[in-house]
Every structure is written in structure tokens, then in C-alpha cells.
């Protein structure tokens, strides 16, 4: 008998969540933004299970994006921004992959990608915006005609039309909705009733989750219903939108998780040092991803001293005074 | 005269352009520094916010990315990207965005995407992020640049974020209802845009920098006839910048 009977059908291990829901060729959206709340533990598990040909749909995913691309899991990418703060002004493996011509890619902006998830969530086939008029984002298509015939790829990148509600010359951009196969979200809390609570900024996580066919939530803690329902204004997603729940403390490391831990400057600097060199990057994956069979082993390697250093002051939300150079 | 770095001079000069009640959209790096400097030195009633959804954080420590947990701390509210962009483009607000770029042209259009062929670039940069969006929707954009010929170019390799487009009224003819490039702050001086032609001109050069040096480092014709020398940063401006804005010396 599970200690969490209400969510016993959804609670699973990282291994099971990945093998059940993520397939070769899946279209995936990942939550978080650059240095915060990337669902790293499940991303490492995707790499370990050698899932290939992923179609990644991103706004500004930093570390998670770079690991998936670097480990050759990604075939196709729709993206607004590949950067990771000062640790990677341009994400290193992302940059190499595009300069080397080894992935199919297409550029949008952050607002455009967020709107596309929102349209998918609302069941609207497209959504309009003024953003992008006159830019090369609306000039260059990254995908070929052949790619455009494939599953979950929009037949056109965008369409510009005259605003049909206005007689004056007034142009708007129409963007195709996104409905990814899977959204991967890392949250601080999931209630034992399945309710999800994200603390700090939610970025586009909620739109991503609502637009996806399947939602996997990894979390820091599973908390009692009495706690999560005491202040429902704070909650982010209802249980019935979530398909799988995995408890993974420090599951966003080396990115931050507001009020739990900061980003890890030591690990991000280590990554920065090795990621530009193919052999060193391969060795990094061998050591930190393939060489550990679980997130617990990975955290053992990071070490309690470092994990204590990045532990957030729960009131401020970050590790005050942390050496971030 | 006090010693100061390029980043300090850029943060101070951009900060001087911010007014009380401006809503300032900040990016990473110098832009973050300038936004915090604006609030702490020149315009205490300005509001700093981030595309990720953090509004008016306390900024006791300088954030190093727009998703840094420090942009979520001490805020009036934490939201998400769609909420943030509803503020950027809000018709009732005067919103100023701080951006950086790899290339800029005479009309203040920006490239943060790539150099060379788009499909097989010589150099790939991170891409738009929210830059295209704020350049489309905000009331104005202040851009930070290293002043080099290869960055101030006749023609961008890729137009990520639109400024005054091809000059004159071309921006509004695109269908953009407001905004445009307000100023460009570099390590040599401050550029603004002509009211009619919308071409960039030199408005100020820093102490110790000549007009000739600015021309030498600009890849297109730049009108320098209207330029005057900027005042050097005061000891008090530098003190606040160093002691209150970035005491850990992460960006300065």
C-alpha cells in the first residue's frame, strides 16, 4: 500500500517515467529558464536511456537544452534563446551543433514561443502578435519543405496578415500553436493529492504543461494535502493535468530552484571548461551522466559541502553571499 | 578625476537616461548593472522588471541572468513570460528596454542571432530571447555595445530586433504602433537617433575620447556634429555603483 494512495498510479521512478512516456522522435518542452529550474534529473535520465531524435521546443532553456544537444539526443530544435547567463553567453554545445550543421533548427522569440504554448493550451490552432514584424525571424525559415510535412511540425513557420478587424493598413503575425508530446516540469512541491506548486517565477511552465499531451512533474518534496490546500492561491497545476510524478530532491541541479537552492557556480564553471572540447565533453557525460545510475549518485559526487553552499535562504530564495564567479 | 571602467561608465550613462516612473526591462550583464544603477542613483521611482516575470525585485545582490533567483526575491509579484510581455507592450506604461547585441546598424536594428549564413553560421549567438519582443512592443530601447567597426555595420547579418527599420516612418509602416531605438551606449559614448531620418548620430563622447576615435570605430557614416563631452562620473555615482549595486564585483 502506497503512503500516497491518491497519486499511487502517477508516482514513479525517473527510469519508469522516461521509458514509459519519452520515445525516439518525441516532441518535448522543458520548463525552467536558463539557470533556474531546468528539469535536469530527468534530462540526465533521457541521456542515460539514449533517447534520440528528440524535437525540442524551447523558449530560453539553458543547461537542459545544452546537455540534450551535446548528448546527441536532439534532431530538431525550435528555439528563442540558447544562453546560460554568464556561465555560457551562448550555450556551448548548442552553438557547436548549429555551426556544425548537425541539427535542424528554427528561431523564434521568447514571447512568440510562449504564445505558441498558450495557443496549444487553449486549443487554438494559431495566435497573433505584433512581435517580430520587419525582422529576419519572419524572413528565414530553418526547416525544409520535407521537415514541414512531418508530425508535429507546423506547415508554415508563420503567416503575416492584415488585421481583419481594422480597415487601416495594420499587419499582424500569426504563429502556429504547439502541442508537444511531453512537457517536463520541475516543481518545488507536489501535494499528496497531486496538486503542483511552483515557487518563484513560473516562466512559461504552465502554458507548456497545459499544451502537452503528457506532463511529467519532478519535484523537491511531496507534501500533505492539508498543506497544499491551505493556500490554494499559491498552486500552479491541478492533479488531473499531471500524468507522472517523480520525487527528485535537487532535481534541477546545477540550475537553481527558488527557495530551495541556488545555481551551482562550481559545476557550471566546470561545465563551461569542458563543454567546448568534444573529448572533454564526452568524458564529462561519462563521469556525471552515464557513470552514475541515479540522481542520488550524481548528488553524492557533487558532495554535501557544495550542496550546503548553494542551499537557499528560504526567506530570500537564494544563497546569500554565494561566490558566483 | 576618479578612475572608472568602461562598464561603470556605460552603466552610469544609461542610468542617466532613465526617469522616475519609467518601467525598465533589464537583460543580463551591463544591462543588469545599468538598471540597478538607474534605480539606486537617478530614478528611485523607476521600476525594474524582467522578461521572466519578476517585477520590482529588491536587488540586494546583482542577478547574473534574467532567471536568477535574485530577480524573484523581494518583488511585488512573481509571474511568467506572458505576463511580463503584457507589461512591456502595455499602452498605459512608458517601458524602456535595455538590450545588448553583436551587431547594430545606423537605424538601431540589432543582431543577436548569427554571423554569416543563417543555416550554417560562422558564429552563432544565443538568438532573440525576449529582445525581438521588447524591440517590437516597448516604448523605447537603449542598447549596450562595444564600440567596434565589426559591430557597427552597414548591413546586419541577421535582423533579430527591429529599431527604426529603414528610417523615416518605416517602423510604423511595418505595423508597429510605438517604440523604436532611443539610444546606444558604448564604451566610447552615447548615440541617439535623428528625429526625421532616424539615423544614428553621436550625442556624447566620454572624457578622453575624441570624435575621430568614435568615427574610426564605426562601420557606417556617423554624424558627430551635434556631439558634446559627457560629464565624468562623480565619486558618489561610482561609490553607489561599487558599494550598493555590485558589491561582489561580478559585472563591474
Image: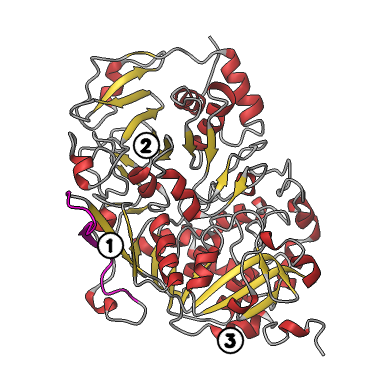
Q: Are marks 3 and 1 on the same chain?
A: no
The answer to whether residue B30 of the structure is visible from this angle is: yes
Asked if the stretch drawn in magenta spans residue A160, the answer is yes
Instruction: Indicate the quadrant containing the C terminus of chain B: top left, top right, bottom left or bottom right.
Output: top right
User: Please, which chain is the residue tagged with disc 3 on?
Assistant: A
User: Please, which chain is the residue tagged with disc 2 on?
Assistant: B
The mark closer to the camera, 3 or 1, is 3
The mark closer to the camera, 3 or 2, is 2
Can you name the residue that lies furthest to the bottom here? A1
Mark 3 residue crowding within 10 angstroms, few (<14) / some (14–19) / many (20+) = some
Q: Which mark is residue A19?
A: 3
Task: Identify residue for label 2.
Answer: B139
C-alpha gap between disc 3 and disc 1? 33 Å
Q: Are marks 1 and 2 on the same chain?
A: yes
Write the start and end of the magenta stretch as one range: A153-168
Q: Main secondary structure of the magenta part?
A: loop
Give the x, y percent position of residue A240: 61, 79
Task: Identify residue for label 1.
Answer: B119
The answer to whether residue A71 of the structure is visible from this angle is: no
Mark 1 residue crowding within 10 angstroms, few (<14) / some (14–19) / many (20+) = some
Give the x, y percent position of residue A229: 74, 67
Quick one: A279 or B192, which is closer to the camera?
Answer: B192
Quick one: B241 or A317, which is closer to the camera?
Answer: A317
User: Please, which chain is the residue tagged with disc 1 on?
Assistant: B
Q: Colour scheme in the image?
A: secondary structure
C-alpha gap between disc 3 and disc 2? 48 Å
Q: Is residue A96 above or below residue B13?
A: below
Quarter residue B187 falls in? top left
Amino acid at each position: 500500500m502506497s503512503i500516497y494512495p491518491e497519486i499511487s498510479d502517477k508516482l514513479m521512478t525517473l527510469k519508469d517515467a522516461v521509458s514509459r512516456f519519452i520515445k525516439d522522435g518525441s516532441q518535448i518542452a522543458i520548463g525552467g529558464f536558463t539557470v533556474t529550474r531546468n528539469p535536469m534529473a530527468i534530462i540526465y535520465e533521457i541521456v542515460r536511456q539514449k533517447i534520440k531524435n528528440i524535437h525540442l521546443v524551447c523558449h530560453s532553456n539553458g543547461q537542459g537544452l545544452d546537455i540534450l544537444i551535446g548528448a546527441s539526443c536532439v534532431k530538431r530544435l525550435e528555439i528563442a534563446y540558447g544562453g546560460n547567463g554568464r556561465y555560457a553567453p551562448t550555450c556551448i554545445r548548442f552553438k557547436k551543433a548549429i555551426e556544425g550543421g548537425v541539427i535542424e533548427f528554427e528561431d523564434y522569440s521568447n514571447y512568440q514561443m510562449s504564445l505558441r504554448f498558450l495557443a496549444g493550451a487553449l486549443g487554438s490552432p494559431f495566435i497573433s502578435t505584433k512581435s517580430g514584424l520587419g525582422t529576419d525571424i519572419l524572413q528565414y525559415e530553418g526547416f525544409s519543405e520535407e521537415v514541414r510535412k512531418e508530425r508535429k511540425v507546423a506547415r508554415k513557420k508563420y503567416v503575416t496578415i492584415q488585421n481583419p478587424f481594422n480597415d487601416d493598413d495594420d499587419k499582424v503575425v500569426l504563429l502556429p500553436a504547439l502541442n508537444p508530446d511531453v512537457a517536463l516540469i520541475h516543481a518545488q512541491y507536489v501535494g499528496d493529492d497531486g496538486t503542483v506548486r511552483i515557487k518563484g517565477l513560473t516562466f512559461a511552465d504552465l502554458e507548456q504543461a497545459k499544451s502537452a499531451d503528457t506532463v511529467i512533474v519532478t519535484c523537491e518534496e511531496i507534501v500533505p494535502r492539508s498543506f497544499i490546500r491551505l493556500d490554494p492561491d499559491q498552486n500552479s497545476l491541478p492533479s488531473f493535468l499531471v500524468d507522472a510524478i517523480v520525487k527528485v530532491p535537487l532535481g534541477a541541479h546545477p540550475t537553481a530552484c527558488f527557495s530551495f537552492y541556488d545555481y551551482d557556480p562550481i559545476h557550471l564553471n566546470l561545465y563551461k571548461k569542458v563543454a567546448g572540447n568534444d573529448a572533454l565533453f564526452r568524458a564529462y557525460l561519462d563521469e556525471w551522466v552515464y557513470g552514475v545510475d541515479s540522481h542520488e549518485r550524481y548528488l553524492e559526487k557533487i558532495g554535501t559541502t557544495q550542496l550546503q553552499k548553494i542551499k537557499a535562504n528560504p526567506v530570500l530564495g537564494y544563497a546569500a553571499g554565494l561566490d558566483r564567479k | 578625476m576618479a578612475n572608472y571602467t568602461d562598464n561603470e561608465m556605460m552603466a552610469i550613462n544609461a542610468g542617466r537616461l532613465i526617469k522616475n516612473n519609467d518601467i525598465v526591462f533589464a537583460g543580463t550583464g551591463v544591462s543588469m548593472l545599468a538598471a540597478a544603477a538607474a534605480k539606486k542613483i537617478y530614478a528611485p521611482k523607476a521600476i525594474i522588471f524582467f522578461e521572466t516575470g519578476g517585477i520590482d525585485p529588491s536587488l540586494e545582490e546583482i542577478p547574473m541572468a534574467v532567471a536568477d533567483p535574485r530577480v524573484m526575491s523581494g518583488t511585488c509579484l512573481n509571474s511568467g513570460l506572458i505576463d511580463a510581455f503584457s507589461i512591456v507592450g502595455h499602452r498605459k506604461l512608458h517601458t524602456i528596454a535595455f538590450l545588448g547585441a553583436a551587431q547594430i546598424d545606423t537605424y538601431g536594428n540589432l543582431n543577436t542571432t548569427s554571423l554569416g549564413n543563417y543555416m550554417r553560421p560562422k558564429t552563432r549567438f544565443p538568438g532573440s530571447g525576449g529582445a525581438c519582443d521588447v524591440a517590437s512592443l516597448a516604448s523605447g530601447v537603449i542598447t549596450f555595445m562595444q564600440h567596434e567597426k565589426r559591430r557597427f555595420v552597414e548591413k546586419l547579418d541577421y535582423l533579430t530586433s527591429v529599431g527604426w527599420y529603414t528610417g523615416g516612418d518605416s517602423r510604423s509602416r511595418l505595423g508597429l504602433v510605438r517604440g523604436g531605438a532611443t539610444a546606444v551606449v558604448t564604451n566610447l559614448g552615447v548615440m541617439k537617433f535623428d528625429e526625421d531620418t532616424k539615423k544614428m548620430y553621436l550625442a556624447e563622447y566620454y572624457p578622453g575620447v575624441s570624435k575621430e576615435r568614435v568615427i574610426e570605430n564605426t562601420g557606417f557614416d556617423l554624424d558627430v556634429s551635434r556631439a558634446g563631452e559627457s560629464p565624468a562620473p562623480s565619486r558618489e555615482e561610482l561609490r553607489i555603483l561599487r558599494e550598493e549595486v555590485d558589491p561582489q564585483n561580478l559585472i563591474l
